[in-house]
Image (spheres, rainbow, N blue to C red):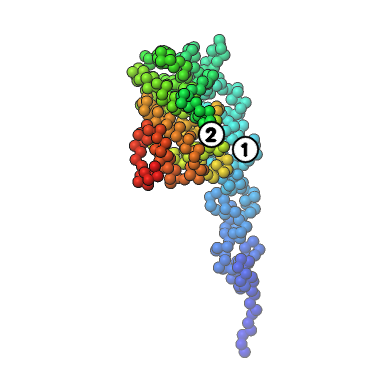
Amino acid sequence: MPEETQDVQLVECHCCGTEVREESAKAVEGEYVCELCYPIKTVECFECNERVLIGNTERISTNKRVCRDCLDENYTFCRHCEEYYHNDEIQYVESCDVSVCDSCYEDWYGTCECGYQDRKEELVYFDGRWYCDSCRREYLVTCCRCDEYEHTDDCYIDESTDDCYCRACYDRGYHQSNESLHDYNYQPDLKFHHHPLENDRKRNKLYMGFELEVEVETRTQSIDDLVKLVEDHMKAEGKERKLYFKRDGSLTNGFEIVSHPMTLRWIKKELKLNKVLDILRNKKVSSYEKGTCGFHVHLAKNFFEGTEVDKLRLFINNNYQAIYDFSKRKTTGGHFFKKENYDLDAFKRCFNQDGRYWAYNLNTHKETVEIRIFRGTLSYKRLIASMELCDAMAHYVKVISFMKAGNPKDSWRDFLAWCKRENRYHKFLMHIKYQPSKQTVASV
């Protein structure tokens, strides 16, 4: 007689639907899983070590997986990097009603000495500490010369004027009155200058103003005397009040030479800037040598129409390396003229600019945009070449499309060819040693 066979109990795999023997299946969260699905469709929870269906887990920051119960109890979602972190690695910022991981908190948030937390742009960072608005008003003052913060215990207050000076500006003697050497925030009544040949009212003129930072090499030379020397020369040349002079706390022992708004043609034909530079060189004043000085060019916003300001922003950032090479900065002071990650997508997202230390600065608090990438120099040809580049870029973006300004392959080459055709940017082309290719020559 044959042996009596026992009935085989079959169950359905929760993952693949295949029927398998009950004794060979694995029980996971009350469901049967076949031997094939078990290693790929289930996982051990990193937190409680229980085996769970992979669909009922979430991946956390360490690339491990945890079950839903452990996730809800022990983990929080960081709103910045969009990863789950253990609650021990999460900080809740009450002022913003947001939970962020420790890494994102360090990148985006700060804690005042009073314990108040907020985004960094809402706080003030000074001397290794963050200050909320209330503590800033109580413990910090703004220097009237360099516009930088100083602690109330370390500042100097001129009792006759109630002006506050930081320790650095006070030590440099900036608290002493001088009629010709103005505060950093000084803004005169602007006088606009253009050449008689530019009197055509139908054509919009580009006015530019420059800021040239210089360093006085020796402490034995008086900045006041140097400023007076330049002023006397300008007066003798009939160019009085075309330039003015400001203190600059970012310099070791120097000042800024600032122009009123002028067209490039007027600067070349009328200002006689080369003679001013000769005077400074003869007095051992420098601008290029230490690498601490910059040459900044402001362009009047009313020259641009529509989205041309943004088009220039796109062109400069797209061709940053070529402009940087021309600027002669050579890695000096890079935090004062940073490159933006600005492209066509950023323009479409209306990407705003935070701060002012960008190669192309929109936050001048004036009716200008500022190109601040150039290294300071007392070379007349180099200064004119830099202003020619600024003038050329401003005019060029008026005749090209956004797509052309944002083309990383051809926009700089096409720009140089356009400069050549314009036949008025000779010093700029000379300094970059421009040699048109055969293709470019054919188009010129």
> Could you tell me which quadrant the N terminus lies in?
bottom right
Q: Is residue 39 visible?
A: yes
What residue would you read off at disc 2?
Answer: 304
Residue farthest along the bottom direction in this orientation: 1
Residue 290 visible in this rendered orientation of the protein:
no
In the image, residue 103 sits, relative to residue 131, either above or below, namely below
Earlier along the polypeptide chain: callout 1 or callout 2? 1
Residue 435 is left or right of residue 311, and the answer is left
Disc 2, SS: loop
Which of the two discs, 1 and 2, sits closer to the camera? 2
In the image, residue 64 lies at what x, y percent?
A: 55, 53
Quarter location, residue 132: top right
Residue 19 in the image: above or below residue 123: below
| Residue type at tag 2 | Phe
Check disc 1 and report its element: helix, strand or loop: strand
Q: Which residue is mark 1?
A: 93
| Within-10-Å neighbours for mark 1: few <14, some 14–19, many 20+ | some
Q: Is residue 345 above or below residue 4?
A: above
Q: Residue drawn at (62%, 42%), measured in percent from left and top? A: 99
Q: Quadrant of the C terminus?
A: top left
x 58%, y 47%: residue = 82
Question: What residue type is disc 1 on?
Answer: Val
